[in-house]
Structures are given as C-alpha cells and as structure tokens.
C-alpha cells in the first residue's frame, strides 16, 4: 500500500472516530433534553442556597430561559460522554503504539476521566458554596443580588473547565516523566516556582476574588506533588523494563 493510500485510510478512520464520538454526545443529549430545566436547577442550587430570602435569579434576555438550560445540557452531555469520546481516541491511536506504551496510555485515559470529574465535583460541592456565600455577603447595602441565568451559566462553566483541567496535572506530569521531557527530581527542584505559578494560574482562570483563586491554586499544588510521586514510580518502572529488555537482547552483556 502506498503512503498516499495509507494517509487517506487514516483520514477516513479519523473521520469515522470523530463521527462516533459526536454521535455518543448527541445520544446523551437526546436522553437529557427533557430534563434540561431540572439540570439547570441542580447546577444553580449552590447560588440559590446562598441568595437572600425573597430573591431569585433573573433572565435579562428574552430567549435565555429556553436556551440557557439547553446549552448547559449540551455541555453536560459532553462531560458524560467523555469515556466514549476517549475510547474513540484510544481506538484510533492504539494500533500505532508499542505494548509498553499501551500499558501506560490506557490507565492514563481512564484516570484522566476520573480526575476531570473529580475537578468538577470539587468545584460544585466545595468552591461554589464558599464563593457564592462570600459574593452575597459583600454586596453593598441596598443592592439586591439577582444574578442573570446566562451570566451564571457562563461563570460556572468556566470554573468547571478550569478545575477539571487543573486536576489533570498528575497525568501531565506522568507523561512528561515517561517521555523523558523532565524528571521527578527536576520537578522537585522547581517547587517554589510551581507554587507561585499555581496562584498565577488561579488568578487567570477564576473570578477576581482571593477565595476561588486559593481554592484552585492549593489543589493544583497538591496534585503537582502527587504527580511527582507517581511520575517517579513510572520512570523507575520504565528504566527497569528497558534494562530487562536490553539484557534479553544481549545476554552476554557484562560477561568476561
């Protein structure tokens, strides 16, 4: 088979995998569309619980009461379908991987999904109640807190993505150590810079308040430490595997 034919075959395979991933998201969306209002109410609960009595959220746009819940449902559908999407990614790249690479990538795809969900859960159950209670408590006297539903949706989606991606730090560190980009020892030496960088990233990805910035920066730093430990274990295991393979290939190595 010529290189051109191989390239076209890969493109056809890629298109097929993308369509299957989109189909998975669409099927989940159809299953959840009927519950769009309930899903939005569930996501809005941390804000509603912290709002003063006799107040509620508002809609400043005519169509936002309809579009905001469906927009949220579409994003939630993607989050739920992430395992199916990652499976299509795995099915596309797996044939070109070595056996030892498959042993690394498969667990990482699974763990990255769990970490992304964990980041979203941390944002919803820990960050949102604290942040919204703080925002409502510092409202000037005479100001009624009535958040627009579209503005709230954009706010929470931004935080969901920020915390979901931040919780992927251990996976990124493991990949860097495994591929030889860096080592666990080098990363340990950069702890002070990482600590400062975590707060800078927290400042850029979260609203301009100290609470949400700190609640993102601290888990990032802790996950960095976890990533160093696991990355060191993976690097040591890789080194042992390479040594064992070289000894099998050259059994007389080291003999006089």
Image (cartoon, rainbow, N blue to C red):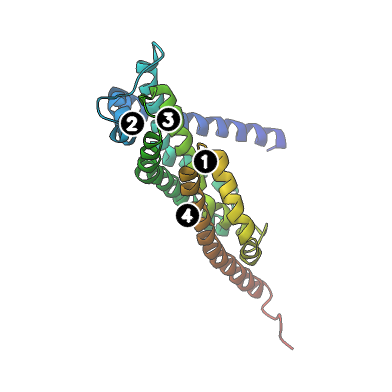
Query: Which mark lies nearer to you, 4 or 2?
Result: 2
Question: Can you see residue 229?
Answer: yes
| Residue occupying the far left of the picture | 54
Residue linked to disc 3: 75
Q: Specify the quadrant that holds the N terminus.
A: top right
Q: Position of residue 247 (x, y in %)?
A: 65, 75
Label 4: how many Cα within 10 Å (few below 14, some 14–19, many 20+) = few
Residue at the spot x=42%, y=22% of the render? Answer: 150
Which image quadrant for residue 140? top left
Question: Residue 41 location, x and y as percent?
Answer: 29, 29
Picture layout, residue 32 above or below residue 187: above
Determine the secondary structure under disc 1: helix
Mark 1 or 4, nearer chain start: 1
Which SS class for mark 2?
A: helix
Total numbered badges shown on the rendered structure = 4
Mark closer to the chain start, 2 or 1:
2
Q: Quadrant of residue 46?
A: top left
Question: Considering only order in the chain, which callout, 4 or 3, is on the residue closer to the N terminus?
Answer: 3
- Residue tagged 1: 89
Q: Is residue 98 visible?
A: no
* Labels 3 & 2 near each other (Cβ < 8 A): no
Read off the residue under disc 2. 44
Residue beneath the point at 63% across and 68% down: 242
Q: Earlier in the sequence, mark 4 or mark 2?
A: 2
Q: Earlier in the sequence, mark 3 or mark 1?
A: 3
Q: Which residue is mark 4?
A: 107
Instruction: Name the element at disc 4.
Output: helix
Q: From the top left corner, tell me how far across and down residue 201 is, in percent.
A: 58, 45
Q: Quadrant of residue 135?
A: top left
């Amino acid at each position: 088979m010529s290189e051109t034919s191989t390239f076209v075959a890969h493109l056809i395979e890629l298109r097929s995998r993308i369509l299957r991933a989109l189909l998975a998201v669409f099927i989940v969306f159809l299953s959840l569309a009927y519950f769009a209002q309930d899903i939005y109410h569930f996501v809005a609960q941390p804000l509603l619980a912290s709002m003063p009595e006799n107040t509620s959220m508002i809609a400043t746009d005519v169509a936002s009461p309809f579009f905001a819940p469906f927009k949220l449902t579409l994003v939630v559908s993607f989050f739920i379908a992430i395992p199916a999407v990652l499976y299509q990614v795995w099915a596309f790249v797996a044939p070109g991987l070595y056996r030892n690479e498959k042993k690394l990538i498969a667990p990482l795809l699974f763990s990255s999904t769990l970490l992304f969900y964990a980041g979203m859960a941390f944002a919803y159950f820990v960050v949102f109640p604290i942040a919204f209670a703080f925002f409502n408590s510092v409202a000037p006297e005479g100001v009624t807190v009535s958040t627009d539903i579209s503005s709230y949706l954009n706010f929470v989606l931004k935080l969901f993505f920020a915390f979901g991606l931040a919780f992927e730090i251990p996976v990124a560190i493991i990949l860097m150590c495994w591929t030889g980009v860096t080592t666990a020892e080098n990363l340990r030496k950069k702890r002070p810079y990482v600590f400062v960088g975590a707060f800078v990233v927290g400042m850029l990805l979260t609203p301009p308040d100290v609470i949400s910035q700190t609640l993102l920066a601290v888990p990032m730093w802790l996950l960095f430490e976890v990533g160093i430990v696991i990355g060191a274990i993976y690097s040591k295991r890789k080194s042992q595997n390479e040594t064992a393979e070289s000894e099998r290939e050259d059994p007389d190595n080291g003999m006089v």
